[in-house]
Image (cartoon, rainbow, N blue to C red):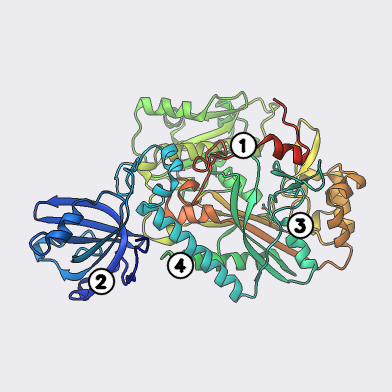
Amino acid sequence: MLDFLSGLRRTDMCGALRASNAGQKAVLMGWVNRRRDLGNLIFVDVRDRSGVTQVVFNKERDVAIHGKASTLRNEYVIAVIGTVKRRDDATINRSLPTGEIELVADELRILNDSKQPPFLPGDSALPHEEMRLKYRYLDLRRDALQHNIELRHDVALAIRNHLSAQGFFEIETPFMTRSTPEGARDYLVPSRVQPGTFYALPQSPQLFKQILMISGFDKYFQIVRCFRDEDLRADRQPEFTQIDLEMSYPQPETVWEVVEGFLTAAFRVAGFEINTPFPRITYDDAIRLYGSDKPDMRLPAMTDVREAFAAGDLEKLGVNAALPLLAIRIPNVGKLSRKERDENKELFGVQTLELSLLDMDRLEKSLPQAAAHLKGMCSAKPDDLVALVGARQPSDFKATAAGLCKTAGAYRLRLADKYRERHGVFKRSGDPAQDFRFLWVSDFPMFEYDEDARRWNPAHHPFTSPHDNDMDKLESDPGAVRALAYDVVLNGTELGSGSIRIHRQDIQRKIFHALGMTEDEARARFGFFLEALEYGTPPHGGIALGLDRIVMIIAGAESLREVIPFPKTARAVDLMVDAPTPVSAAQLKELGIQVQK
Ligand code: ASP
């Protein structure tokens, strides 16, 4: 008898039964989540992806079925036919959506048994992550992951529907392609037909989506896998999913409106109404006020408090008055002990020659007026922690205002993390406007100087358009050229990044030149694209956002691995399928590849 389901059709989901179903027949199919044997009564919680229902097997009603139920073990797969019954008031379980009912079993079929699993989906204590990843199929049965994967589906679908309604087409681009320009290492795929040649997996569909604009597709998007062989940090995966889009004839604001639209739709399906338009800030202001190009707006900005001091005071304190003196305010930290103050000094890190942390307590004694004034300048309340970071004299040290701001900005985040319990701003308040602080950061620098290689690199990718007004500085002052590039930031995390592109071949040539790339080098890498640019390319621009990260933040999850069905470890290993692995000598030979031991 292989036809386990003969004559049976599932009529109900385990999590959907309610008191209003009382008296009805129901057919449930799912896993044994838990079995409790009380002698004459056996209770089995049956689970499917919608939730659990309690099933009762009553010996007095039916000895045979009760006997069969006694053989059930965790994670057996069963079908139960029964009658929905309202529970007695005393046995109602308010913590379960189905807690008002139970199913009284008339028939039980065991569809499959199960080995004793290394951990149970219903366990409250989580096993070690390696164990979870090895047995990912069991891990995915857990409520939290079932919820996250469903959320991911809902979010992706809301985004697709929204973009489609705005006239965007979802268009696929190849996975087997050639090196693309995002600047990470490529994953390579050897060609068998042409030994010694390789495809590269795309780091993004960048050039294809620009070519789609040249091809007349106006508005493109794709929810697409990207591959980057980077050293992995906790919040990175070698393959990840982007919401990638491109449009013809946009201003930056045109792209921003589209993104705000689909993020509104994505957060709405999760029950959060976010506010648009998002606030906007330039890169320079972001650095000046937050010391970061992805400011966490849930915390107060930093304040330059030099004005609080009378002439000569800063010199007496050994502070370089030509650079900002930054006050960092962390709300509601309360009185600090001597020990905590010392720890905070350590948290600042080694005081470099150039930068230092001023002692607020000492300042309050030595210059009480200035201390009071500066606290007023940053709107500090009595319980707020105020830390002061400045540059030291003499002023011929190398400190720059931007370097100082970044050091202070990083310290601001470390302090905020340390006192997260006290200020509470990282906890969800229930008000989306406060819990999800979105921000556009624009006008990024066009180039970054690489000290080792002694040359300018593109800060974004080399197809990013410079600001019209900065064109004349391309040769004379590359460091001052701003790009028409923008990032969308949420709670201090970069969600996505994009730009208006270069659509003219003459300008593209100038950029390659500024990057120290010869005409031949540029042709060798991007020749097909440079040629395409010459056939009437419309002005265009776009952006790409990380879907994994968006779902992670909406879910309130701690790691990307909680929202990716089959993630890899920090060593880029898939523990379930055990990849990567060596391949056979025959396979290598066919590809003309020799592996060095
Ligand atoms: N392709 C870019 C990236 O993945 C995004 C963009 O410029 O649209 O970072």
Q: CA distance from mark 4 to mark 2?
A: 33 Å
Going from N to C along the chain, the mark reached first, 3 or 2, is: 2
Mark 3 lies on residue: 207
- The residue that appears at 42% across and 61% down in the rendered structure is 432
Mark 1 lies on residue: 231
- The residue that appears at 45% across and 41% down in the rendered structure is 134
Mark 2 lies on residue: 26
- The residue that appears at 75% across and 70% down in the rendered structure is 249
Question: Which mark's residue is nearer the viewer, 3 or 2?
Answer: 2
Q: Is residue 282 left or right of residue 526?
A: left
Instruction: Note whether ligand 1 is within 8 Å of mark 4.
Output: no
The quarter of the image that holds ligand 1 is bottom right
Question: Which mark's residue is nearer the viewer, 1 or 4?
Answer: 1
Q: Is residue 46 left or right of residue 41?
A: right
User: Local crowd at mark 4 within 10 Å, few (<14), some, or many (≥20)?
Assistant: some
Specify the quadrant that holds the N terminus. Answer: bottom left
- Name the residue type under label 3: Leu
Going from N to C along the chain, the mark reached first, 1 or 2, is: 2
User: Mark 1 touching mark 4, by CB under 8 A?
Assistant: no
Going from N to C along the chain, the mark reached first, 3 or 1, is: 3
